[in-house]
Amino acid sequence: MDNRGQHISQQFDAELEKIRNQVLSMGGLVEEQIRNAIRSLTDNDAPLAEEVIKNDVKVNNAEVTIDEECSHIIARRQPAASDLRLVVAVIKTITDLERIGDQAERIARMAIRLSEMERPKNQYSELKTIGNHVASMFHDTLDAFARMDPEAAVEVAKEDLKVDTEYDGIMRQTLTFMMEDPRSITRMLDVMWTARAIERIGDHSKNICEYIIYLVKGKDVRHTSLEKMEKEALR
Amino acid sequence: MDNRGQHISQQFDAELEKIRNQVLSMGGLVEEQIRNAIRSLTDNDAPLAEEVIKNDVKVNNAEVTIDEECSHIIARRQPAASDLRLVVAVIKTITDLERIGDQAERIARMAIRLSEMERPKNQYSELKTIGNHVASMFHDTLDAFARMDPEAAVEVAKEDLKVDTEYDGIMRQTLTFMMEDPRSITRMLDVMWTARAIERIGDHSKNICEYIIYLVKGKDVRHTSLEKMEKEALR
């Protein structure tokens, strides 16, 4: 038995496990950023928003670190087949995680702007609803990644349709407010941009779910219908 | 002399050259999409906008094809150092190219909506200006990629600051129109979303410029200042 070969393969497995864990830990950080950004908005908590803005650099650093780790693994280990798919999926996933982080920062900046304006009676409950929806969608995305579960990934992708419907509702409602009361335009625009940033987090989560299906099933399901995605995931 | 080794290395070079050309050809397609989307908007040309929407599938297909090509190269050739950086940079670049394609499609959809509404006297000249600016910024990005020129990449990244300033101007102007004439709100919102989509193309172009610097200089300049980026590029 070739002990040396086995030893190298164990080391390699440990390295792959390490980048998976790094992705999950970066994901945990991003989830905290999303939840704090939403809370800073709905609880009118500007200091919390400042914290989110300050912490975005941690998300950026995580992306750069994991990227380097992936390049090292490709160069040293020459991964093939499913190992290679894992590394490529990780490179793509962390790009989306970083951009979700940017959206959280954007929400936090809006929270600060909105904290300086008159508050509506409902304390932006519609943003709270869609925000919590997207935060839990993102949580499920990380779960699907942790368990490498393509079925769960399809379920998350389906949620994105509901988020889009909620988003459309907020857009219509905000437009109505603007037309009824032009003095509300500036504030309503900020609400629109915030809703947009939240909705984008849903899109990025869906992207990550597509990478998970690609990773486990070896089939690229981007740019296909939800039906086709589901068929591949359950195959 | 090991002819076989040389032969393999020539094949490998040819493969790397092939994916570089594929990226440039995908980029050319995306540039056409951007220019047609802007033109459909400013020339009030709904059929051209329909064409842009229809052609987005070509951009999507190019991304999937090049992605597969990159995975094959990594698996077969075990690239190291600068070859590996090229492949990783390509994987990242085409993600941004695909998202630029999505923004072009979004602009085309707005062009169709706006074609059904009253036109301003200036025929959206402010969108034409920022649109052409971003289109030429994107063109220079492809040039910098073709020549693997980090200095040119820094110049493009600098342009993005000017685009951001133009974008802020359009946002302020549109807001003023909305407040002066609430009947213009719906149309002005579409102008805002269009300006936003154009501005995002600038951001994605800047991302690609950062990958070019990483590729040539081996230094990750994402999330750093323009000054630091320039220092690395000229080193």
Image: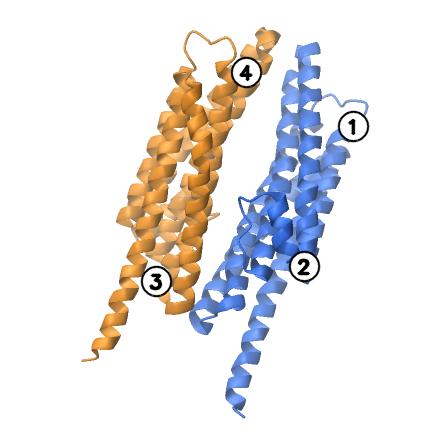
Chain colours: A orange, B blue
Q: Mark 3 points at which residue?
A: A83
Binning the other alpha carbons within 10 Å of mark 4 as few (below 14), some (14 to 19) or many (20 upward) gives many
Mark pair 3, 4: CA separation: 47 Å
Tell me the kind of residue under disc 4.
Met
Mark pair 1, 2: CA separation: 37 Å
Kind of element beneath mark 1: loop
Q: Is residue A130 visible?
A: no
Q: In this view, does A124 lie above or below A140?
A: above
Q: Mark 4 points at which residue?
A: A188
Kind of element beneath mark 2: loop
**Disc marking residue B149:** 2
Q: Give me the chain letter of mark 4.
A: A
Kind of element beneath mark 4: helix
Disc 1 and disc 4 on one polypeptide chain: no
Q: Does label 1 or label 2 sit earlier along the sequence?
A: 1
Q: Does label 3 or label 4 sit earlier along the sequence?
A: 3
Mark pair 1, 3: CA separation: 53 Å
Tell me the kind of residue under disc 1.
Gln
Disc 3 and disc 4 on one polypeptide chain: yes
Q: Is residue B226 above or below residue A121?
A: below
- The quadrant of the image that shows the C terminus of chain A is bottom left
Disc 2 and disc 3 on one polypeptide chain: no
Point out the frontmost of discs 4 and 2.
2
Name the residue nearer the viewer: A126 or A31: A31
